[in-house]
Image (cartoon, rainbow, N blue to C red):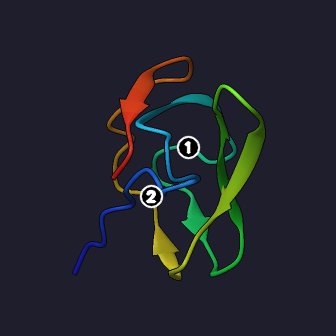
């Protein structure tokens, strides 16, 4: 079963964030707590960690993309 990783809600007023950098690539094995990607908002940047153990099946966006929250 695959789990979809959504852009996390970082603040009350944020509607979008920029995916700054991927720390994984398609096919990588990941563990819970491992960094997946870095986000930038108008105010700061954040690293997002995996909530799951498993494998990266696909990356559905690219570094530099501005993405909607959730």
Circles 1 and 2: CB distance less than 8 Å?
yes
Give whichever of discs 1 and 2 has the lower sequence position. 1
Q: Nearer the viewer, residue 67 or 33?
A: 67
| Residue 7 horizontal side relative to residue 1, left or right | right
- The crowding category of the residue bearing disc 1, from other C-alpha atoms within 10 Å (few below 14, some 14 to 19, many at least 20), is few
**Residue drawn at (58%, 53%) of the image:** 10
Residue 5 at x, y percent in the picture:
39, 60
61 vs 39: above or below: above
Question: Measured from the top left, where is residue 57 in percent x and y?
Answer: 35, 56
Q: Is the residue marked by circle 2 packed among few (<14), some (14-19), or many (20+) residues within 10 Å?
A: some
Q: Is residue 9 above or below residue 23?
A: below
Q: Residue furthest left?
A: 1
Left or right: 6 as drawn, with respect to 2: right
Q: Determine whether, in the image, residue 35 is placed left or right of residue 66.
A: right
Q: Is residue 18 left or right of residue 56?
A: right
Residue labelled with disc 1: 25
Q: Quadrant of residue 45?
A: top right
Look at the numbered disc 1 and give the secondary structure of its residue: loop
The quarter of the image holding the N terminus is bottom left
Q: Is residue 29 above or below residue 70?
A: below
28 w.r.t. 23: above or below: below
- State the mark number for residue 56: 2
x, y percentage for residue 43? Answer: 74, 31
Looking at this view, is 54 or 5 the one in front? 5
Residue 32 image-quadrant placement? bottom right
Please give the name of the residue rendered at 53% of the width and 82% of the height, measured from the top-left corner.
53
């Amino acid at each position: 079963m695959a789990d979809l990783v959504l852009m996390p809600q970082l603040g009350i007023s944020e509607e979008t964030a920029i995916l700054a950098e991927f720390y994984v690539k398609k096919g990588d094995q990941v563990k819970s707590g491992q960094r997946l990607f870095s986000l930038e908002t108008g105010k700061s940047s954040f690293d997002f960690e995996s909530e799951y153990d498993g494998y990266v099946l696909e990356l559905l966006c690219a570094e530099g993309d501005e993405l909607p929250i959730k």
